[in-house]
Amino acid sequence: MKICIRFFLIFICLCLLLTTGCRREEAAPGYEKVEKTGYMMGTVVTLKVYVADAGKGNEAIDKAFARIGEIESLMSLNSENSEVGRINEMAGIEPVKVSDDTLKVIQKGIYYGELSNGLFDISVGPLVQLWGIGTEHPKVPGGSDLEKAISLVDYRDIKVDEKSREIFLGKAGMVVDLGGIAKGYAADEVKKIMVDEGIEYAIINLGGNVLAVGGKYDGGPWNIGIQDPYAPTGSSMGVVRIEDKTVVTSGDYERYFEENGKRYHHILNPKTGYPEENRIKGVTIIASSSFDADALSTTVFLLGVDRGLELVEKLDGVEAIMITHDREVIVSSGIGDTFSIQNNKYKMK
């Protein structure tokens, strides 16, 4: 069995930076870049701010990391003491009172469940746990186990009482997994902190959920590379130019394992119980909200090229870039000159 370890290597390398805390370097005359990297919410988090006063940048970054930690403590799937852990423990038994944060994320997850007719489903936890992709022991599940897990996945069985802030899972054994949406929420919360702290120029990166605060300090847009799905991490196939926007990518190359010569990735279709197989290799969403873009990148991947593009075209302020398995690039109508291909192996449709 072969397991993708790309993100583990990134984590090991970047954790070395933690011993030095925030890093400072001159970005341009009058500005310093203050940067800090950590491992939170199951991914590598890097925050970069560009400020005249490094002390102010350090303070903003420290507050941002504290906020991410707070969200992680509420929504971690692997902690029985988190609110999500308690919701899952009480599935089929009784409602659980939650914070405004958890309530908002679960409500947004249900919204995208409705929007996608159940393809994006935050109750996908039983399937995620069954496959174990990204863990040390992934496996292809058997038929009866798969059928049982599928029967427990249905966002419509998540009952929300907004007034009392209570969440109830209607069936014993249900598992809410907010991994497909919580990082986007956290990124937006970090941006709020940056703005409140008077930071005008920053890049927020939560494991590929990239969110820009303002434009670049030199007056131009930020250039965000789009990962080449067929190349090592850090290799771009194209560039998106953004100001005050987010860029979120989901792809079948991010986490996967191989068994008996077949490759299985982590984006599971809750209807079939298996990793989705369609023309799409990767989807990048560009929007104002990382919260929405996080859910949409997975939703569009599961919908496929035609239905995914149809959905994006209906949403105001949302654009998409899709990369197919034959290196064809399909973009939504509003992309314009904000995106360009940098690798001649890829062709725009």
Image: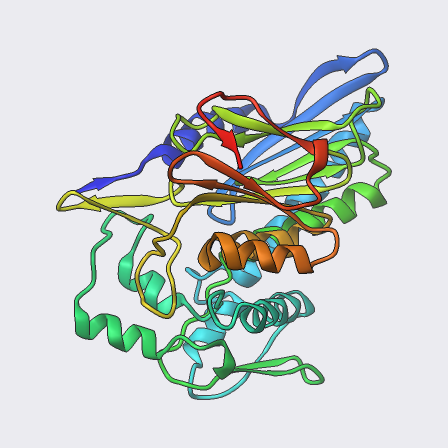
Determine the image quadrant of residue 269.
Answer: bottom left
Q: Nearer the viewer, residue 28 or 113?
A: 113
- Seen at 57% across and 62% down, the residue is 74
Is residue 330 depicted above or below 176 in this figure?
Answer: above
- Seen at 74% across and 13% down, the residue is 26
Picture coordinates of residue 281, whole percent (x, y): 41, 43
Colouring used for the render = rainbow
- Seen at 44% across and 25% down, the residue is 13
Is residue 120 depicted above or below 224 in this figure?
Answer: below
Q: Nearer the viewer, residue 294 or 86?
A: 294
Picture coordinates of residue 175, whole percent (x, y): 41, 72
Q: Can residue 93 be seen by looking at this rendering?
A: yes
Q: Nearer the viewer, residue 250 or 76?
A: 250
- Seen as rendered, the residue at the extreme top is 29
Report the side of 189 relative to 295 (left or right): right
Report the side of 283 relative to 67 (left or right): left
Is residue 27 depicted above or below 128 in this figure?
Answer: above
Quadrant of image for the N terminus: top left
- Seen as rendered, the residue at the extreme left is 260
Picture coordinates of residue 189, whole percent (x, y): 71, 51
Report the side of 304 relative to 151 (left or right): right
Q: Can residue 72 be seen by looking at this rendering?
A: no
In this rendering, the count of numbered labels is 0
Picture coordinates of residue 303, whole percent (x, y): 48, 59
